Image: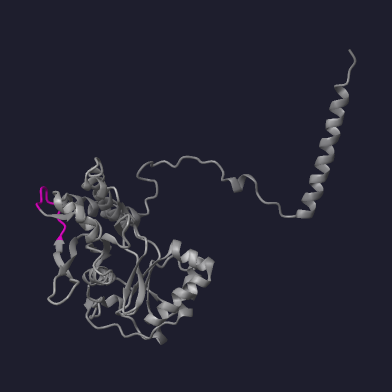
Amino acid sequence: MAECPLNSQPEVMQAHKIIPQANIPAFLLTPPLTNGKSSLPITPEKRTVQEVLEIFKRHQQGLLKDQDLILLPLRSSSYTKLREQLKADDSLREYVDNTIRLDYDPVSELLTIKMTASPAHETVTAAITQSVSLQLENHTTGDGPVATYARKIYCMGTSRIYLLYNEVEFEKSPDNQFIHLEASYPGVVFEISYSQEGANLESLAETYILCSNGDIRVVVGIDMDYPSISSASVSLWQAKYIEEPDTTMPTVMVDTVVKNQVISESINHPFKLDITLDKFGPEEFAINLKETPIPVITITMTDLARAIQRARIGRIRESRRQIDRAVSKVRRPSGLLSEDKNPPRTDDSNNEAEDRQENRETDQDSDDKDQDCDYED
C-alpha cells in the first residue's frame, strides 16, 4: 500500500498565526477567535523538548488550568525525544496520559495540547455516540455473521491513536472512535471542530486514513461556529483502495463522500450519513459479511440537529454560569464538609498533653464506676 503521502501544509486560522519565539511567552495560548483564514505555511521557531516538558509540569502544578488549547511548533525528532523522556518520568507520564490530550502533525510539525474537552464537544459527541451505539447493539442478537461481527465493535472514546509518517510514530486523540476487538486501529473516527480553531478536518481525515495504512476506514467531521454555535456542518471521508497494475497491494486513497453539509433543523430533512457495518473494522475482518446483506448504521439530519441544539443550549448555560439554577431556584441548606467537622489542631505539643490528661480523667471515671458497681449478694 502507499506510504502516508501528506504533502501539503494544513490551513491554519489567522488567529492562530504563530509569531517568532522571541515575542512569545513560554507557550502559545489560544488567541482571540476570528473567522479569517490564512493559507500561509507555519514557519515559527521550534520549541525544545525541555520547554514542552516544562509546560506539562506547569499544568500538573495547576498553573495552566485556564488554558484549553496550546499550540507548540516542535520538530519531529524533538517529538520522538519528548515521548522517550516522558517514559522515563513515571509521575509526569501518568499525568499526561490521564489528563492531557495530545495531537501531533508531522507535516506542519505542530504539537497541539488540548487540556479539556468543552461542554459543546462532549454534548455533540455523546449524542452521536448514543445513536451509533444503539444501532450497533440492535445487530448483536443471534448467531449469524452480522451478530458475531457487531458484538466485536465497541467505543473507545478519546483513546490515543498511534500513526506512522516517514518512520515517525505520532499520536492523535479523536473525539470518539469505534474499533473492532481484534483490530489495531478504529474503523470509524469522529472529530468535532470549531471553525476558529484552525483544525482542517479534511487534512485531519487524510492523516487518519493514510497514516493508518487505510485501516481507519471512515472519518466523520463536525464543524461548529463558535462561540454562538449558530451554524454547523458535517463531512465524511472514507478510505478507497485502488488496484494498480503490476502491484500486489492496492493503493490507499481518500474519498470525500460528504463535504460541509449544513446541519439543518428542518423537519423531515432527507439528508443522512450511512456507514455500513463492515466499515467499523479492517477490510479483511469483514470477509464473512460479503455473503449477507450488510446492515447500515445511519446518522440522520435529526440526530445531527438535535446534537447541535443541545450543544447550543449547553453553551448558553455555560456562558451564564447557571450552576444548579435550572433545577432549583432556592439554595438548599447543606451540612458541613467532613474537613469542617474536624478542624486540624494547631499546637501538637499542647494537644498531646490535653489528650493524656483526658485519658487519665477517663480512666479514673471508669475506676470509680467499677467501685460503685461492686456489691455482695
Q: Position of residue 261 (x, y in %)?
A: 14, 61
Q: Nearer the viewer, residue 319 or 369?
A: 369
Please provide the residue range marked out in magenta.
262-270
Q: Residue at x 39, y 49 (%)?
A: 323
Q: Is residue 194 visible?
A: yes
The scheme the figure's colours follow is one colour
Question: Residue farthest to the right?
Answer: 376
**In the rendered view, would you say 1 is above or below 140?**
below
Q: Position of residue 145 (x, y in %)?
A: 22, 47
Q: Position of residue 329 (x, y in %)?
A: 38, 42
Q: Nearer the viewer, residue 116 or 252?
A: 252
Q: Quadrant of residue 258?
A: bottom left
- Looking at the rendered structure, the number of numbered marks drawn on it comes to 0
Q: Is residue 316 visible?
A: no
Q: Residue at x 59, y 45 (%)?
A: 338
Q: Is residue 343 left or right of residue 172?
A: right
Quarter occupied by the N terminus: bottom left
Q: Nearer the viewer, residue 41 or 274?
A: 274
